[in-house]
Image: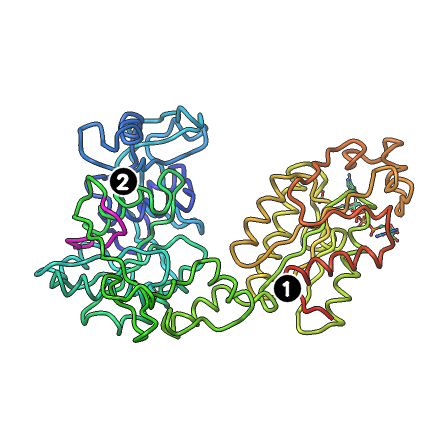
């Protein structure tokens, strides 16, 4: 890796590109040698062979297509700087092939990589050690790797202790980063270190879930096996065996909670009458949503605390209520009424991001073109997601005419809290009859271009959590409907 000093001048003239989060994670693992024998992004032939048969063109087993998507304009460059989202150059791609993905028709660039800088890491950067460093410290006996996107509860901890004893192994815990609660996951795993054999190491690895290898699929397990091997593991703990891994998978015997003696132990040693069923994910979520304690028999208190922090009770969880609808449909009126009602009830911080107000400040200068409307909604979504992340209530009331952009906001917010979409479905005729600001009259007269509903599209939502036609109710009734939904969903206490 070159020094952290300035970059070679020649790089200034090269085009630069910021890969998406999964590609950036791939880039980091490629540069770190964790994807050995891969040294760069795959070309069309290798990718096709991997997808078809799980092998590179030369026959080496490799589970997932590690490819780099770029816009078509970049396909004629010979060298490309790959940078992080802040624009810091990380590597130069020596392009050996530009190819078009046969399924998506999207363009890909292939080739080896020249490292420039190690990626900057935020929280827990001290733990993010390079594979060869970790492997060098582990030389000696067997090393059992646990790769996980979830905390380890008492059952897995017991199984892990049993396997370690059987193998005489040390333990390498690899939290797989790239989910919504990375830091919480690492904290939960660090918290159980003292329940694991001495010398257990925790090394976070950027391995986000990928669509072509969903969590728990064969390809996902094989990729985990390759990566764990690169970090020095000799065995991989897994819930099933799969052919072709870089290291053998070890499957623990089934464990359960023995309610008689109040311990977790191998199922075979428990009287069937005393087996207590494990908490399902749904049961766990229900307890967390209600703010009820997670029982100690299930998981250590430190893990329970992390689970609760990652999924706070609904009464305290961040929430975005997003109103969408035509101009004059009643969004601002209902949004304002809702904000007032929530503030009157107390216990919540409320921010109202009204369409008109946003356009005077956050989105000042934007027009009503599709590109500017999308940017406006993304800005609102970004602010709403931050409010939600901090446990507040964001109430947004823009027209938001495009379904794809609304879906983006839903996704962004849902990663950090909850999202409710309210479609204010007042018919155009009624909005036009109200014409509070006289804009419809101007739009009909051709004085305003691109006016939603008249000369610009509005895509009706098919994913609304509530639909309100305000021509059929008073503003008070409309607000009450939204409040009822929030009470039914558990976000607001019934009065
Ligand atoms: N061409 C055109 N089309 C639609 N609306 C227009 C237009 N020009 C100005 N206005 C006024 O701007 C308000 C809509 O802004 P938004 O930010 O909510 O629109 S968008 O979500 O970006 O599409 C909207 O306010 P509301 O009536 O509160 O919806 C209008 O008053
Ligand atoms: N049930 C209702 N809910 C909301 N607004 C209503 C209702 N009935 C009549 N209105 C009137 O319709 C107009 C809606 O305007 P506004 O809330 O600014 O809409 P938007 O923000 O969607 O442009 C207001 O004048 C409001 O008084």
Q: What stretch is highlighted in magenta?
A: 230-241
| Res 51 quadrant in image | top left
Badge 1 marks a residue whose secondary structure is loop
* 166 or 351, nearer to the observer: 166
Report if residue 478 lies within the magenta region: no
Residue 90: % across, % down: 34, 48
Residue at screen point 31% across, 46% down: 8
Q: How crowded is mark 1: few (under 14 residues within 10 Å), some or many (20 or more)?
A: many
Residue at screen point 65% across, 63% down: 393
* 348 or 98, nearer to the observer: 348
Left or right? Give the position of 249 relative to 287: left
Relative height, residue 128 to residue 407 (above, below): below
Q: How is the image coloured?
A: rainbow
Q: Residues within 10 Å of mark 2 (few under 14, many from 20)?
A: many
Residue 141: % across, % down: 9, 60
Decide which of tag 2 and tag 1 comes sooner along the chain.
2
Left or right? Give the position of 379 relative to 262: right
Residue at screen point 80% across, 55% down: 478
Relative height, residue 343 to residue 100 (above, below): below
Label 2: which residue? 113
Relative height, residue 361 to residue 157 (above, below): above
Residue 492: % across, % down: 67, 66
Label 1: which residue? 491
> Disc 2 and disc 1: Cα gap in Å?
49 Å
Residue 225: % across, % down: 23, 47
* 360 or 379, nearer to the observer: 379
Residue at screen point 71% across, 60% down: 352
For the C terminus, which image quadrant?
Answer: bottom right
Mark identifier at residue 158: none
């Amino acid at each position: 890796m070159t020094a952290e000093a300035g970059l070679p001048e020649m790089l200034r003239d090269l085009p630069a590109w910021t890969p998406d989060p999964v590609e950036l994670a791939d880039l980091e693992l490629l540069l770190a040698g964790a994807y050995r024998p891969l040294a760069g992004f795959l070309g069309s032939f290798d990718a096709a062979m991997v997808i078809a048969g799980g092998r590179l063109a030369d026959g080496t087993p490799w589970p997932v297509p590690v490819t780099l998507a770029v816009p078509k304009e970049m396909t004629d460059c010979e060298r490309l700087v790959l940078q992080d989202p802040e624009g810091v150059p990380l590597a130069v791609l020596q392009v050996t092939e530009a190819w078009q993905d046969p399924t998506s028709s999207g363009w890909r660039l292939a080739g080896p990589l020249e490292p420039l800088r190690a990626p900057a890491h935020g929280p827990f950067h001290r733990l993010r050690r390079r594979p060869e460093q970790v492997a060098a410290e582990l030389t000696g006996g067997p090393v059992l790797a646990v790769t996980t996107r979830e905390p380890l509860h008492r059952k897995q901890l017991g199984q892990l202790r049993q396997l370690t004893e059987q193998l005489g192994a040390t333990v390498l815990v690899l939290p797989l980063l790239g989910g919504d609660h990375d830091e919480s996951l690492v904290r939960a795993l660090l918290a159980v270190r003292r329940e694991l054999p001495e010398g257990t190491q925790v090394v976070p690895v950027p391995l986000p879930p990928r669509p072509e290898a969903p969590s728990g699929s064969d390809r996902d397990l094989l990729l985990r096996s390759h990566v764990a091997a690169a970090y020095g593991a000799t065995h991989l703990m897994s819930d099933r065996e799969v052919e072709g891994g870089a290291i053998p998978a070890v499957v623990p015997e089934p464990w359960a909670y023995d309610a008689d003696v109040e311990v977790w132990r191998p199922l075979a040693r428990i009287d069937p009458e005393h087996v207590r069923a494990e908490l399902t994910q749904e049961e766990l979520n229900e307890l967390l949503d209600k703010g009820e304690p997670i029982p100690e028999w299930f998981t250590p208190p430190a893990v329970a605390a992390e689970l609760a922090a990652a999924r706070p009770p609904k009464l305290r969880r961040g929430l975005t209520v997003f109103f969408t609808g035509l101009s004059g449909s009643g969004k601002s009126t209902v949004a304002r009424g809702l904000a007032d009602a929530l503030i009157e009830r107390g216990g919540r911080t409320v921010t109202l991001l009204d369409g008109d107000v946003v356009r005077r400040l956050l989105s000042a200068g934007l027009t009503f073109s599709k590109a500017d409307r999308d940017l406006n909604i993304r800005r609102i979504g970004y602010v709403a997601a931050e409010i939600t992340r901090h446990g507040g209530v964001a109430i947004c009331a823009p027209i938001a005419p495009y379904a794809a952009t609304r879906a983006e906001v839903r996704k962004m917010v849902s990663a950090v809290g909850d999202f409710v979409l309210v479609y204010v479905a007042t018919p155009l005729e009624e909005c036009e009859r109200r014409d509070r600001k006289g804009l419809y009259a101007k739009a009909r007269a051709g004085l305003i271009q691109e006016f939603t509903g008249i000369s610009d599209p509005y895509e009706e939502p098919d994913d609304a959590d509530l639909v309100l036609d305000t021509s059929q109710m008073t503003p008070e009734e409309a607000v009450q409907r939204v409040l009822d939904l929030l009470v039914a969903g558990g976000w607001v206490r019934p009065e």
